[in-house]
Image (cartoon, rainbow, N blue to C red):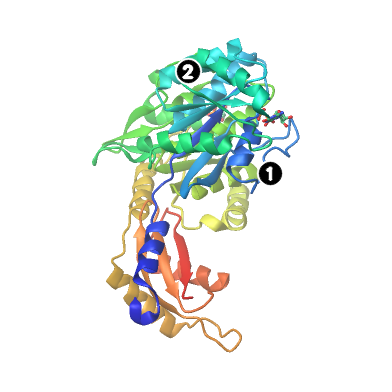
Amino acid sequence: AAEEGFDLEDVEGAIEAAGHGPLPVLAVVGRPNVGKSTLVNRIIGRREAVVEDKPGVTRDRVTYEAEWAGRRFKVVDTGGWEQDVLGIDASVAAQAEYAIEAADAVVFVVDAKVGATDTDEAVVRLLRKAGKPVVLCANKVDGPSGEADAAYLWSLGLGEPYPVSALHGRGTGDMLDQVLEVLPDAPAQTFGTAVGGPRRVALIGRPNVGKSSLLNKVAGEERVVVNELAGTTRDPVDEMIELGGKTWKFVDTAGIRKRVHLQQGADYYASLRTAAAVEKAEVAVVLIDAAESISVQDQRIVTMAVEAGRALVLAFNKWDTLDEERRYYLEREIETELGQVVWAPRVNVSARTGRHMEKLVPAIETALAGWETRVPTGRLNAFLGELVAAHPHPVRGGKQPRILFGTQAGTKPPRFVLFASGFIEAGYRRFIERRLREEFGFEGTPIHISVRVRE
Ligand code: GDP
Ligand code: GDP
């Protein structure tokens, strides 16, 4: 490294930064209008406008990356939803339940000006049950005179209420320091499984693509649970399913099976549930209705899994209904609409007839193998050397930036750091990714490539 002009410490730092595993997840929960979205905006530094969204507009982005005091984590915002037909308690409970389930720690936001309500008490019971670390945010304390209001919230029994003004930023630093105290470094439930334990699969997809049908098919009809109301069930949300001679943990299956018909916020629930399932899983099986045109919603769900860095399988369902013409157009749509995930293994199934169910497990195993692939540094550099010699970066401004060396900093998904003598253009980065995939496989996994340029 030294002879290439990089400081050894820089190199080690870059490798460590790029190799970070999955980030711990912080959920922000509470009643509507207590200031959750405002607080999330504050935490993520307003890089993405959360609050600007108009009420009633579907928001499907629910997780954001944040950094505080040099530590990175994810924030799940539950502010994008509205009261529904089930009434406020049930809907708060349902959204909080999903978010808490997926989280490593929780910020519980209460409006200090209003004080603790019955709904707040209901959330407290959920939090107790979940046993996750909680930081109590007494929001809307815009000045010193509000601090007495915050003190009343000791009565919730969740420890010290942190007086905060999400709107003005007052007190948020102290609260976030406390969050970092209780937030684990790595998401415990996602990667804490003992070696050889069941792999975690999230079966996701937009409503009516056939998720519950597929689950019933693979798990056996007798295990179907119907007619449960959100917020009233306390059954385990993960289910062990025998498939292909192995046990798999399908995460958040209760969410799939709950037949809740919500008038408002249903899309938001679906997004929150999807995000929660993805966070808990190692591999996402995105189910797509092959009989219908691939929609923006399908693409968003795929993107959610890719951005979360999970292994990915695409399953096209309802294959029994396709005629020749639809099959033709489907292939064209897959090329244009899902071009960014050409690397994902694909299965064409029918939950109704059971067609190609046996192909699901090999596809999942392929994706997980790609996700865990580690390329030895020697092999990687031999490959990079040949690639750079055969296809040099275009000359820019009389200079030719070169990739000098690289290393794989992490797996799950594979993360690479490349060290370069100058700025490497996006096109050339994509070229490297394509060649890496050709050379080493990585079927079914996103890969991350970061480039460090010599100062
Ligand atoms: P959510 O429904 O819990 O996500 O709440 P929002 O973040 O949308 O905030 C609800 C309302 O409370 C908005 O009008 C915010 O401007 C306001 N609000 C949020 N935080 C504060 C605060 O710290 N102080 C004051 N005075 N108002 C706030
Ligand atoms: P979910 O909302 O994704 O859980 O979807 P469901 O499992 O409830 O299925 C939605 C509808 O599609 C139901 O009427 C199912 O019977 C139907 N369906 C599911 N899978 C298939 C399939 O492979 N072929 C056909 N023809 N219909 C299916």
Lower sequence index among marks 1 and 2: 1
Of the pair 281 and 419, the residue shown nearer to us: 419
Spatial CA span between label 1 and label 2? 29 Å
Vertical relation: 127 (above or below) 268 = above
Tag 2: Cα neighbours inside 10 Å, few (<14), some, or many (≥20)? Answer: some
For the point 55% across and 57% down, which residue is it? 340
For the point 34% across and 82% down, which residue is it? 3
Residue 362, image x and y in percent? 34, 47
In the image, what residue type sits under mark 1? Ala
Q: Is residue 130 visible?
A: yes
Residue 207, image x and y in percent? 59, 32
Which quadrant of the figure shows ligand 2? top right
Vertical relation: 240 (above or below) 88 = below
Q: Is residue 231 visible?
A: no
For the point 42% across and 85% down, which residue is it? 389
Circle 2 SS class: helix
According to the image, label 1 marks what residue?
49
Vertical relation: 388 (above or below) 61 = below
Q: Dividing the picture into quarters, in which one does residue 5 lie? A: bottom left
According to the image, label 2 marks what residue?
126
Q: How many marks?
A: 2
In the displayed structure, does residue 259 sit left or right of residue 35? left
Of the pair 38 and 259, the residue shown nearer to us: 38
Q: Quadrant of the N terminus?
A: bottom left
Residue 372, image x and y in percent? 33, 53
In the image, what residue type sits under mark 2? Leu
Of the pair 268 and 226, the residue shown nearer to us: 268
Tag 1: Cα neighbours inside 10 Å, few (<14), some, or many (≥20)? Answer: few
